[in-house]
């Protein structure tokens, strides 16, 4: 592994140099930046994924939608369409991507959800047609062609950006100096009862003001069956995931369950043959008090692939998640103060 890292080091330097120079061109005004005229919040990360971005977007939008007209703009990663598209009741994950479909299913008509690979085009279309008070940009921290009024940077507690390295050695999409563009930093997926000492050590290593940093943790909901039937008692799980980092979820389940993990890449499109292999693996389990469990994001892609017969025979379930954040009132007040300023 050390030899591989040594061999990849020059490529990380080249990639890092390119992204550094690109960012400087935006900073110097050589590359054009579109400043979003509406109130806008971008939520993203410096790494390639796994920071828990989706539940944090949902948390902020859920708060804002009670008092403001809100639109979410996403690239729609993994979709098989192009251009600007507003998510509706007939949309599928193939059309819009799993995350936008997740947002739409959670917020229904309370929030407009839009996908567009060009964030500038998406913002302009939203301004002209939907007229929201606030646009929330999902995963646009590196998309420097548009500038939001507020930027929130996420970093995972177990894999913080200050101990990571550039691709392909590490998972960073740009050097950690990109943190300077963030108004606030949220350290995600924190363990229960995180001490103030650990928080202060983390902030110190980030080399940022403590007032900028918040810490959040995942809250797991009740298990939900795909077919809406009662879940019943279970003590074993075949965990099927297509997310960047399934291990916190696995560790949570292992507190009182036996867990076997079948992990696929992030945003994976499940084929019928893969689903058949999952069913075969489940059939081989000796414990009959078992479930096939997945994430709510994976549910968005899996539900169209499973037949009524599949759901009658196999107990496919998912677990919804939310987040809790320390100094929550202070964090939400910062957002309100920004949105309400003229």
Image (tube, rainbow, N blue to C red):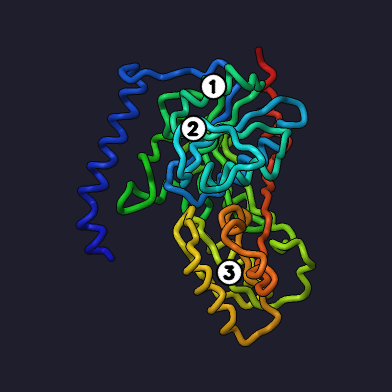
Question: Gap between marks 1 and 2, in whole Å?
Answer: 10 Å
SS state under label 2: loop
Of label 2 and label 3, which has the lower sequence position? 2
Q: Horizontally, is 162 left or right of 188 in the view?
A: left
Q: Is residue 34 above or below residue 261?
A: above
Residue 272 horizontal/vertical position (percent):
50, 65
Q: Are marks 1 and 3 in contact (CB under 8 Å)?
A: no
Quadrant location, the C terminus: top right
Residue 268 horizontal/vertical position (percent):
47, 56
Question: 10 Å neighbourhood of mark 1: few (<14), some, or many (≥20)?
Answer: some
Which residue corresponds to mark 2?
Answer: 116
Label count reads 3
Q: Is residue 336 above or below residue 156?
A: above
Q: Horizontally, is 172 left or right of 40 in the view?
A: left
Of label 1 and label 2, which has the lower sequence position? 2
Question: 10 Å neighbourhood of mark 2: few (<14), some, or many (≥20)?
Answer: many
Q: Horizontally, is 250 left or right of 219 in the view?
A: left
């Amino acid at each position: 592994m050390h030899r591989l890292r040594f061999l990849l080091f020059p490529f990380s330097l080249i990639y890092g140099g390119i992204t550094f120079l690109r960012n400087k061109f935006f900073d110097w005004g050589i590359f054009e930046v579109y400043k979003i005229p509406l109130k806008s919040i971008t939520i993203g990360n410096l790494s390639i994924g796994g920071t828990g971005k989706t539940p944090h977007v949902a948390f902020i939008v859920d708060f804002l939608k009670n008092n403001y007209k809100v639109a979410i703009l996403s690239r729609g990663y993994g979709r098989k369409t192009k251009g600007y598209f507003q998510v509706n009741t007939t949309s599928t994950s193939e059309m819009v991507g799993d995350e936008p479909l997740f947002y739409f299913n959670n917020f229904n008509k309370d929030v407009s959800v839009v996908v567009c690979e060009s964030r500038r085009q998406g913002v302009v279309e939203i301004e002209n047609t939907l007229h929201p008070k606030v646009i929330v940009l999902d995963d646009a921290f590196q998309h420097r062609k548009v500038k939001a009024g507020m930027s929130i940077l996420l970093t995972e507690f177990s894999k913080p950006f200050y101990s990571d390295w550039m691709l392909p050695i590490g998972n960073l999409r740009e050097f950690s100096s990109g943190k300077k563009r963030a108004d606030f930093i949220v350290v995600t997926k924190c363990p229960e009862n995180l001490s103030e000492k650990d928080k202060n050590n983390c902030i110190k290593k980030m080399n940022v003001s403590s007032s900028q940093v918040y810490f959040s943790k995942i809250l797991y909901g009740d298990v939900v069956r795909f077919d809406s039937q009662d879940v019943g008692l279970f003590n074993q799980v075949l965990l099927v995931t297509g997310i960047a980092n399934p291990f916190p979820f696995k560790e949570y389940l292992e507190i009182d369950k036996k867990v076997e993990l079948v992990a696929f890449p992030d945003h994976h499109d499940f084929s019928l043959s893969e689903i058949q292999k999952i069913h075969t693996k489940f059939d081989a389990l000796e414990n009959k008090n078992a479930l096939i469990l997945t994430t709510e994001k994976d549910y968005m892609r899996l539900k169209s692939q499973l037949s009524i017969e599949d759901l009658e025979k196999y107990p496919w379930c998912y677990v919804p998640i939310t987040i809790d954040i320390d100094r929550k009132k202070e964090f939400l007040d910062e957002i309100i103060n920004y949105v309400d300023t003229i």
